[in-house]
Image (spheres, rainbow, N blue to C red):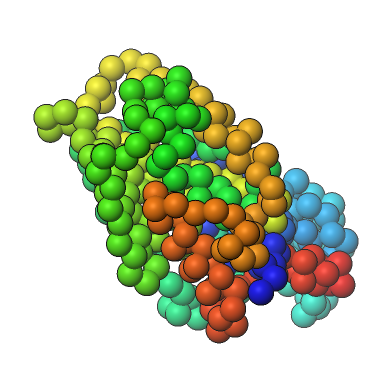
């Protein structure tokens, strides 16, 4: 089996922080395609194809008026469902059917905006976001962090699932007092759900894009790290991280400290992950050596290979999508 770098699972992916979307539309990129986000008159997030169907202008350069998105080029206005409701140059003529923009499912939860990169006729058929309940727990104060790596999402996911690199890659931060061996390590996999226990920490991973790490912090104090892995295209990925703590919640500067510390940790990983060859996991398991501590990553590879082989699982081919954009 030849691994196809361009094919990815269809799922709910985080594309930006809620706080980034105000009264001005913004553009986001997911799986090789650009989208525009804006808020309607009720403040609900809407998502359309990023480029105007008239002359291809970037709709994120436009404006929001009465819950509608207005193109900056010729003033065409669009509803949240993509319906073109106004062409100022011809106010008394019917709107052509081809003038309507494509809309996509979008949600707002856990301080993030989530995009489902396929059109659906009935949004009731969409899968749930499936977020961990910890992200709604009032005992935690949350700190957001986001990084972009020049790497295929499969390598990014494996790097976060990997526990034995901490002593070496993060020897100046979280791995400073860790041993290269794992004293307590066990994991189970059932379907799309990974359950991992390692040296006092508990990790849950849900294929293809969610993971949470829970760690006690002494006494009743606890600490969580939530990750969403978002493929921008076959060569670039984002990691959205939400760190929660139930201690030091009201000390000035603590959020800034945790964000800075998280970025430092991610920047230790970045050159390693970006250096890996090939850029994605190899086309066959046997092309890289595996040991017992690689168990969760091995199971992740097996699930990814299964996804590629199972044509019934929803997928997006980034190359095919690019060709469709050029033809449209």
* Residue 300 in the image: above or below residue 156: below
Quadrant where the N terminus is found in the figure: bottom right
Q: From the viewer's perspective, is 96 left or right of 235?
A: right
Q: Residue at x 36, y 40 (%)?
A: 225
Q: Residue furthest bottom?
A: 312
Q: Position of residue 313 (x, y in %)?
A: 54, 78
Q: Position of residue 218 (x, y in %)?
A: 16, 28
Foreground: 41 or 222?
222
Q: From the viewer's perspective, is 217 left or right of 320?
A: left
* Residue 207, picture quadrant: bottom left
Q: Residue furthest top?
A: 252
Q: Position of residue 28 (x, y in %)?
A: 65, 50
* Residue 143, picture quadrant: top left
Q: Residue furthest left?
A: 219
Q: Residue at x 11, y 29 (%)?
A: 219
Q: Residue at x 55, y 34 (%)?
A: 269
Q: How many marks?
A: 0
Quadrant where the C terminus is found in the figure: bottom right
Q: Is residue 1 visible?
A: yes
Q: Position of residue 205 (x, y in %)?
A: 38, 56
* Residue 267, picture quadrant: top right
Foreground: 267 or 20?
267
Q: Residue at x 28, y 17 (%)?
A: 251
Q: From the viewer's perspective, is 6 left or right of 119?
A: right
Q: Is residue 14 visible?
A: no
């Amino acid at each position: 089996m030849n691994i196809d770098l361009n094919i990815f699972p269809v799922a709910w992916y985080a594309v930006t922080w809620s706080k980034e979307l105000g009264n001005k539309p913004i553009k986001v990129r997911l799986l090789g395609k650009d989208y525009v986000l804006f808020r309607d008159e009720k403040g609900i997030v809407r998502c359309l194809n990023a480029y105007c169907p008239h002359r291809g202008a970037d709709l994120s350069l436009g404006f929001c008026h009465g819950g509608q998105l207005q193109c900056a080029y010729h003033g065409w206005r669009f509803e949240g469902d993509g319906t073109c409701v106004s062409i100022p140059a011809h106010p008394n003529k019917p709107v052509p059917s081809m003038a309507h923009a494509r809309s996509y499912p979008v949600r707002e939860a856990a301080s993030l905006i989530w995009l489902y990169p396929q059109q659906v006729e009935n949004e009731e058929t969409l899968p749930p976001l499936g977020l961990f309940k910890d992200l709604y727990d009032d005992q935690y104060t949350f700190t957001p962090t986001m990084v972009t790596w020049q790497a295929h999402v499969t390598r990014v996911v494996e790097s976060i699932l990997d526990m034995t690199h901490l002593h070496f890659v993060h020897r100046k931060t979280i791995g400073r007092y860790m041993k290269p061996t794992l004293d307590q390590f066990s994991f189970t996999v059932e379907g799309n759900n990974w359950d991992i226990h390692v040296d006092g920490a508990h990790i849950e991973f849900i294929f293809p894009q969610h993971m949470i790490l829970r760690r006690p912090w002494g006494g009743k104090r606890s600490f969580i790290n939530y990750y969403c892995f978002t493929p921008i295209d076959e060569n670039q990925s984002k990691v959205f991280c939400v760190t929660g703590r139930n201690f030091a919640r009201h000390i000035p500067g603590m959020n800034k400290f945790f964000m800075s510390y998280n970025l430092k940790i991610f920047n230790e990983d970045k050159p390693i992950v970006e250096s890996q060859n090939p850029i994605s996991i190899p086309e066959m398991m046997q092309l890289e050596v595996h040991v017992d501590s690689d168990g969760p990553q091995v199971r992740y590879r097996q699930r990814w290979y299964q996804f590629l082989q199972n044509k019934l699982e929803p997928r997006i081919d980034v190359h095919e999508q690019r060709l469709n954009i050029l033809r449209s």
